[in-house]
Image (cartoon, rainbow, N blue to C red):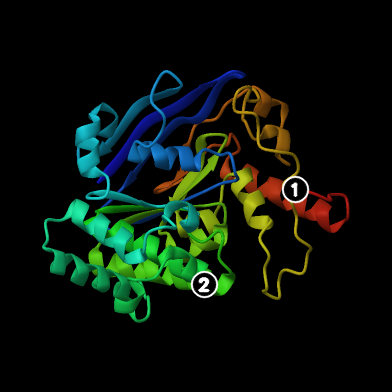
């Protein structure tokens, strides 16, 4: 359904050209759930906005490559053609519901406007559809809730409303940009479960963006790990979480809190900061923070290399070398010689 081919998004700033997204390629099939994970500044949101064509146009924003949706290159379409795709075929759920919902209009007004924009229905049919969508996303007493304003809803309910608005045009692809960031753990789990239910009912493909690996593990089947504007590892969720082949992904996993009996070590952070996207390090962009880095890593910028099946990682270490390096770091950690990874 969606095929991103060698896509680049460069942004011209007074300080230089920011390479926000650099040579990114991936696909999303109908009904598939893909998770994109990485630290803040890794290019996740710029990529999502580029797919929706919501970014600023030239001369400050320079997209290259191809973003093919059902065979049509979105980068080549005119605004009038794009407006037919947004909402109808591709919809987006943004991070902060209060920034997306208008505080002076009721929930019903905003939801029914979205339905009317994308579907030719009578006034009564639009209202009926609005009630149906609020029911689908788990809003209690939906008919009376149409008259409520955003401030009268909790954070979780506002996020449900945003999902309902996104579904108003029956999209084929739903992009969720950090949909659970501002929610507590209980509500977060409910929203993720809701998205699964919506996918089963409507057959919608979902692209979930998050910095939280736990969120990605709960909902995604395929995972893309981004760092410094690039995809540094991709594969099925089992490959990423149990057979990771990229030091950055391994470090992210080790920074997650765990409750199983095997893991009694304290949490480890990734030392340093993400690189400046104007002046990125030479060689592998992760090498200044990598516990396995060698002199060769400072010179070679690795491309994604196949590990097994659909599992790819951007690291010059072979799988045996990577496993040996992990064992060495873990051994040094146990001996008290490593404080941070």
Q: Secondary structure at mark 1?
A: loop
**Left or right, 319 with reference to 341:** left
Residue projecting furthest to the bottom: 141
Side (left or right) of 230 relative to 147: right
Task: Give the residue at x 26% y 56%.
Answer: 113
Question: Where, by quadrant of the figure, is residue 42 drawn?
Answer: top right
Q: Is residue 71 above or below residue 185?
A: above
Along the line of sight, the residue nearer the viewer: 14 or 217: 14
Relative to 211, say whether 202 is above or below: below
State the residue position of label 2.
187
Q: Would you call the spot at circle 2 few (<14 residues within 10 Å), some (14-19), or many (20 or more)? A: some
Depth check, front residue: 285 or 66: 66
Q: Residue at x 44, y 58 (%)?
A: 103
Residue 298: x and y in percent read: 68, 25
Whether residue 170 is visible here, answered yes or no, is no
Q: Residue at x 60, y 45 (%)?
A: 39
Pointer 1: what residue?
341
């Amino acid at each position: 359904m969606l095929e991103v081919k060698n896509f680049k998004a460069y942004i011209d700033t007074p300080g230089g050209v920011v390479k926000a997204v650099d040579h990114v390629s991936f696909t999303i099939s109908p009904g598939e759930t893909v998770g994109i994970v990485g630290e803040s500044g890794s290019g996740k949101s710029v990529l999502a906005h580029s797919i929706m064509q919501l970014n600023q146009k030239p001369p400050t924003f320079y997209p290259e490559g191809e973003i093919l949706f059902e065979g049509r290159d979105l980068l080549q379409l005119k605004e009038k053609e794009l407006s037919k795709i947004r909402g109808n075929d591709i919809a987006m759920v943004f991070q902060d519901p209060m920034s997306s919902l208008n505080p002076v209009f009721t929930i019903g007004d905003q939801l029914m406007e979205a339905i009317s924009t994308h579907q030719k229905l009578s006034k009564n049919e639009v209202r009926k559809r609005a009630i149906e969508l609020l029911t689908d996303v788990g809003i209690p007493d939906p008919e009376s809730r149409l008259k409520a304003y955003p401030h009268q809803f909790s954070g979780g309910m506002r996020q449900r409303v945003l999902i309902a608005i996104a579904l108003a045009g029956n999209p084929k692809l739903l992009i969720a940009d950090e949909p659970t960031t501002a929610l507590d753990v209980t509500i977060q789990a409910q929203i993720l479960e809701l998205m699964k239910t919506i996918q089963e009912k409507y057959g919608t493909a979902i692209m979930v963006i998050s910095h939280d690996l736990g969120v990605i593990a709960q909902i995604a089947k395929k995972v893309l790990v981004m760092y410094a504007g690039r995809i540094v590892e991709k594969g099925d969720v089992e490959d990423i979480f149990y057979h990771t082949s990229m030091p950055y992904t391994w470090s992210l996993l080790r920074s997650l809190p765990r409750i199983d009996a095997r893991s009694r070590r304290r949490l480890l952070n990734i030392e340093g900061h993400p690189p400046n996207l104007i002046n990125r390090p030479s060689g592998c962009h992760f090498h200044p923070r990598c516990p396995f880095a060698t002199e060769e890593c400072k010179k070679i910028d690795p491309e994604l290399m196949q590990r097994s099946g659909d599992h790819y990682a951007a690291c010059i270490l072979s799988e045996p070398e990577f496993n040996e390096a992990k064992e060495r770091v873990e051994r040094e950690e146990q001996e008290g010689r490593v404080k941070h990874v």
